[in-house]
Image: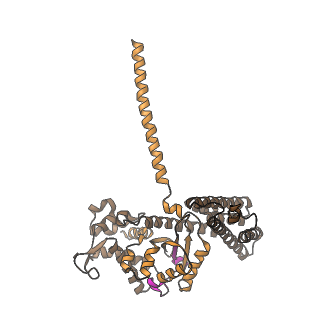
């Protein structure tokens, strides 16, 4: 009798252990899948994962020199596979950027759009990265080339164009926060 | 617009603008106007009177502005404490729900920022001859072979030819993987005209980066006082220029030879 009770008890324990074991394995699998999904590079990270096109980057840098704007670097990263490239324009005060050389916002955008067309570049996105006097990244503004083309062609207002811009002011906000703390009594 | 939101938005853009050394008042106003246009289009500010002309109306902040600044704590947010909310924004982009349909631009914005930050680190390491900083940049963008080329040139300038060769091999492995993935994503095979063009573009890119990195290190050696020996760097420069010439002329043995259309038809 005792032997039977013991055997039943062991079997019960084994069943419980089995259930918990399965749940544990299931939970671990869920964690692994979640981690893979979270750590997986985004579509654009993969698309623009290669090195910049030096010749194209230099060509856009020359455009800014021609416009009389100093301290601007360009980075053109080709798309891996189908789709156009991303053009990143770095305006860096620590490297001599001071102003738009009298060209104004529209002048610079028109010149950019012209160079993209004349050079036969396939640019899908344009990003502006602004660096402060110490070289720290203050903010970025990103939009797609279609929005720039529509704006420079006069098809949309500046207000509508700005609606297509993604602004990331992280560096600027950190600086404001630092200033705020410095000003605290 | 009421003073709180005006201060908030203007402050943000004004700071950008005032940081532009030598920036004149007209340009400052331009940047503020751009910021306000942006905020209007994002629904962060609106006309107090919905029927008024949007170009000249009195404006007010919308709940979305508070949401954007305060995130989850929007309910407790008051205008007087708007500026305190700046800290909560650090590290965040515009909330996707404010920007429906712009996911690709948002994703590109994040990627562009990563590129800018990794590039700055790599450039710094290259200028200082610090391999560790370049390795940090490589860790941030592990498929970008240009950083391996910078690392290789720094090692070679420091006299470590083995480490330099390893770094160049890493770059070549990455370009081979990149090319394979590119061709696969476009359904191209060796022998296709487009595949050959993609191969040449990829390897010209690799050699451009190698040449530029070597030239910069050679210049640094020769400009030093007293000038330093640049022999190993010049030897590598000659090699990479020969690689470029072989690729241009499709000389047998160049990395894209197997991709030529003629080879594919055979």
Find the magenta span and give its range.
A87-107
Q: Residue furthest bottom?
A: A102
Chain B colour as displayed: brown
Q: Is residue A92 magenta?
A: yes
Q: Position of residue B84 (x, y in %)?
A: 34, 66
Query: Residue at (62%, 75%) from the top-left corner?
Result: A55
Chain A colour as displayed: orange
Height in image: A39 above or below B246?
above
Tell me: B94 left or right of B193: left
Q: Nearer the viewer, residue A2 or A36?
A: A36
Q: Residue furthest front?
A: B265
Image quarter hosting the N terminus of chain A? top left
Tell me: B65 left or right of A56: left
Height in image: A71 above or below B159?
below
Q: Quadrant of residue B129?
A: bottom right
Q: Nearer the viewer, residue A68 or B253?
A: B253
Query: Residue at (27%, 83%) from the top-left corner?
Result: B56
Residue B127 in view: yes
Q: Position of residue B4 (x, y in %)?
A: 29, 73
């Amino acid at each position: 009798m005792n032997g039977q009770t013991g055997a039943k008890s062991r079997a019960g324990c084994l069943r419980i252990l089995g259930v918990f074991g399965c749940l544990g394995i299931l939970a671990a699998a869920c964690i692994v899948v979640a981690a893979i999904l979270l750590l997986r590079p985004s579509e654009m990270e993969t698309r623009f994962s290669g090195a910049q096109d030096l010749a194209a980057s230099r060509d856009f840098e020359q455009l800014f020199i021609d416009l009389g704007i100093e301290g601007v670097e360009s980075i053109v990263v080709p798309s891996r596979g189908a789709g156009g490239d991303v053009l990143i324009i770095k305006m860096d005060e620590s490297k001599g950027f001071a102003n738009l050389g009298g060209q104004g916002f529209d002048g610079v955008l028109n010149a950019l759009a012209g160079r993209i067309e004349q050079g036969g570049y396939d640019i899908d996105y344009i990003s502006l990265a602004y660096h402060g006097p110490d070289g720290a990244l203050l903010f970025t503004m990103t939009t797609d080339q279609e929005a720039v083309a529509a704006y420079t062609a006069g098809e949309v207002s500046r207000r509508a164009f700005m609606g297509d811009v993604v602004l990331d002011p992280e560096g600027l906000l950190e600086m404001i926060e630092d200033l705020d703390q410095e000003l605290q009594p | 617009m009421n003073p709180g939101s005006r201060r908030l938005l203007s402050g943000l853009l004004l700071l950008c603008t005032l940081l532009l050394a030598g920036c004149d008042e007209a340009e400052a106003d331009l940047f503020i106007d751009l910021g306000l246009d942006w905020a209007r289009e994002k629904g962060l500010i609106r006309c107090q009177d919905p029927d008024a002309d949007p170009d000249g109306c009195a404006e007010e902040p919308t709940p979305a502005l508070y949401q954007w600044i305060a995130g989850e704590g929007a309910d407790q947010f008051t205008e007087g404490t708007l500026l305190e909310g700046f800290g909560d924004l650090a590290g965040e982009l515009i909330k996707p729900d404010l920007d429906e349909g712009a996911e690709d631009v948002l994703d590109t914005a994040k990627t562009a920022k990563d590129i800018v930050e990794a590039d700055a680190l790599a450039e710094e390491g290259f200028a200082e001859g610090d391999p560790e900083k370049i390795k940090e940049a490589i860790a941030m963008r592990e498929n970008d072979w240009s950083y391996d080329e910078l690392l290789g040139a720094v090692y070679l300038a420091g006299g470590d030819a083995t480490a330099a060769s390893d770094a160049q091999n890493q770059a070549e492995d990455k370009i081979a993987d990149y090319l394979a993935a590119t061709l696969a994503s476009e359904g191209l095979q060796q022998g296709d005209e487009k595949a050959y063009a993609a191969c040449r573009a990829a390897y010209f890119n690799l050699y451009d980066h190698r040449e530029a990195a070597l030239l910069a290190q050679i210049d640094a050696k020769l400009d030093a006082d007293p000038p330093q020996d640049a022999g190993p760097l010049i030897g590598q420069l000659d090699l990479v220029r020969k690689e470029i010439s072989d690729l241009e002329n499709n000389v047998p043995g160049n990395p894209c030879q197997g991709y030529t259309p003629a080879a594919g038809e055979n």
